[in-house]
Image (cartoon, rainbow, N blue to C red):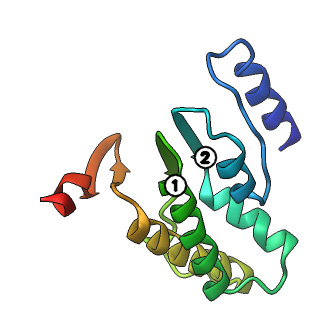
Amino acid sequence: MQERVIRHQQDRLGADWDTVEEEVDLQRVLKGYPEVDILLIDCLTLWLSNMMRHFQDLSEDKVTTICKELTQLSKQRRGTVIFVTNEVGSGVVPANAIARKFRDLTGRCNQAMAKGADEVIFFSCGLPLFLKRADAENG
């Protein structure tokens, strides 16, 4: 995994954007970079994995609360915030308890983020499926 991280860091050298690596405190990132027009958070499933490692008692209610806070902080910023996540609930229910917890927490996170988002786009086979559009709610 460390080799992958190093390779990704090297691939971004000289890019026209800044990279911030944050394991758990996404609130800090949302508050700390008010001057950027587009903020890409990639990805929520890795963030949840880190959260599970740091907080053994992480519950669906706690994840929902944090995700609501993330969407509220996003709406307070000028510019666009894009959250990337993965759909992990479409397959077989894992036999492993930790894997099931991860799947459930991810599902809860995705639901909370989608509810608070202006737009939700699901990509499959490289094609976008618009689940929620900003225009639809504004008339």
Tell me the SS state at disc 1: helix
**Residue 91 visible to an observer of this rendering:** no
Spot occupied by residue 37 in the image (x, y as percentages of width and height): 51, 32
Q: Which of 32 and 18 is in front in this view?
A: 32
Q: Which of marks 2 and 1 is in front?
A: 1
Is residue 57 depicted above or below 136 in this figure?
below
Q: Which quadrant would residue 32 be assigned to in this image?
A: top right
Residue that numbered label 1 is attached to: 76
Q: Position of residue 79 (x, y in %)?
A: 47, 39
The disc, 2 or 1, on the residue closer to the chain's N-terminal end is 2
Rendered view: 99 above or below 126: below
Disc 2 marks which amino acid?
Asp
Mark 2 touching mark 1, by CB under 8 A?
Answer: no
Residue depicted at 71% across the width and 32% down the height: 19
Q: Is residue 58 above or below residue 118?
A: below
Q: Name the residue under label 2.
A: 42
